[in-house]
Amino acid sequence: MAQIEIRLPKMGESVTEATITNWLKNIGDTVNLDEPLVEVATDKVDNELPSEAAGILIKQLFDKDQVAQVGDVIAIISTDGDGGSAASEPIKEVSTPSVSVEEITKSIDNAITTANLNSEIIEKNGASGKFYSPLVRSIAEKENISMSELDTLKGTGQDGRVTKTDILDYVKNLGNGSTTSSIVEVSQPVVAISTTSTTQLGGGTISGIKEPVITLNPGDEIVEMDRMRKLIADHMVMSVHVSPHVTSYVEADVTNIVNWRNKVKKEFEKREGESLTFTPIFMEAIAKAIKDFPGVNVSVSGTNIIVRKDINLGMATALPSGNLIVPVIKNADRLNLTGIAKAVNELANKARNNKLKPEDIQGGTYTVTNVGTFGNVMGTPIINQPQVAILALGAIRKIPAVIETPDGDFIGIRQKMFLSHSYDHRVVDGALGGKFVRRVADYLEQFDVNREL
């Protein structure tokens, strides 16, 4: 009897586990090759995992809401077409994944720094013999939950293992004695005082920082953040704490670009079957400027600077839910304008339809955010760690401007926009940060209005 083990695949260099959110096939169902089998959620993105084989699903090794490590066998598919007999036969023992849990745990432990030196170290195995994943231990350390207290939790995972959901529910109810609803309407004035003296910052906490005291008024509602909003909040706070932000501004005349796009956009749509927006034109200029100033295409690791070889441009994209995600255009400097336009449209559509795959949001080396989409003329964007810079594109506006000609200066109507460049002052000084954004503006202003598609 042929059996295929379906393992949880590697979904990014920093992703070590995923939560099974929904099985799309039940035991006994026929599964086709590349047909969606299960939905999983990581700390970066929700995703459907396709089946790596065609056959009959005979076993699910993880239940809904359980957490699986990268490399774990999550399902077994029989390829001989006899699901009944396959299910009756003993299933061979699952082999140990090539990347062991111990190795993953070790790498995560080395990466996590706990700022609260007074907190108890949470071991991977408690006195009760329970195993605790790196994520569970990290949450316990952030929330000052002791090892002995963690041992008392009743886990809902496989073999009674404490899952992320278990510990988050415990933290949520800690001190309350009961579960509260996600939306609470306040009928009487209430003063909510922070009970913790630490602020969560991505992978750790900072002692001594207290949340403000919030006064609730009648009619106010308390709405719990969804999972993605919590992750964004942690990432933004972490970024501001890690990187000293500086922002430089340049105003660029993009009249030539506006006129050229108006001239060719119908032809482009007819030829390519999709629209030509301003975004790929801006991305092309940014990729060129990065090649001129590679010092903005780096990351910081301690006292080392990692210079990135590839130019992978992230584009911040608003989701229908109001949250934000950053899909990445890989090797943008190697693409022509049509290639960038297709990549922008494809990633934007996948983001809007919740179809992004883990690889679509990984590997970014520089990020661009278009605040002009919302009518904003400029902004002070927060760096997308572990990058060191981000560029905000403001709205294009018609404004009166001085036009220099051989016959003298004149006042005319020009199409202009602001570029806001935020950068990490640890490694990008004002000269580099300012020259880079100026170079982007130069490429935009020197755009050839006679350029062929």
Image (cartoon, rainbow, N blue to C red):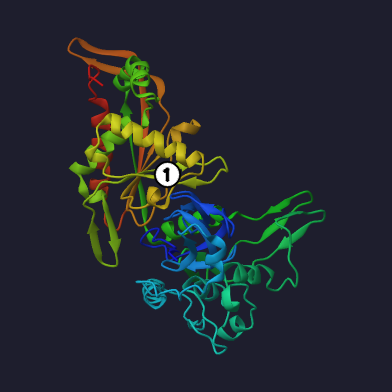
Write the residue at 65% across / 56% down: 224
* The N terminus: image quadrant: bottom left
Q: Residue furthest bottom?
A: 127
Q: Is residue 402 visible?
A: yes
Q: Residue furthest right?
A: 187
In the visual, does 440 lie left or right of 204?
Answer: left
Q: Residue furthest top?
A: 407
Q: Amino acid at mark 1?
A: Thr
Q: Position of residue 445 (x, y in %)?
A: 26, 26
Q: Is residue 370 visible?
A: no
Compared to 300, does 408 lie above or below?
Answer: above
Q: Quadrant of residue 280?
A: top left
* The C terminus: image quadrant: top left
Q: 83 or 221, which lies in front? A: 83
Compared to 271, does 249 lie above or below?
Answer: below
Compared to 312, does 77 lie above or below?
Answer: below
> Can you identify the residue that label 1 sits on?
380
Q: Position of residue 114 (x, y in %)?
A: 45, 75
Q: Position of residue 325 (x, y in %)?
A: 46, 47
Q: 189 or 308, which lies in front? A: 308
Write the residue at 42% across / 57% down: 239
Q: Position of residue 379 (x, y in %)?
A: 43, 40
> At numbered mark 1, what does the secondary structure look like: helix, strand or loop?
loop
Q: Quadrant of residue 316?
A: top left
Q: Quadrant of residue 150?
A: bottom right
Q: How many marks?
A: 1
Label 1 crowd (10 A; few <14 / some 14-19 / many >=20): some
Q: 91 or 392, which lies in front? A: 91
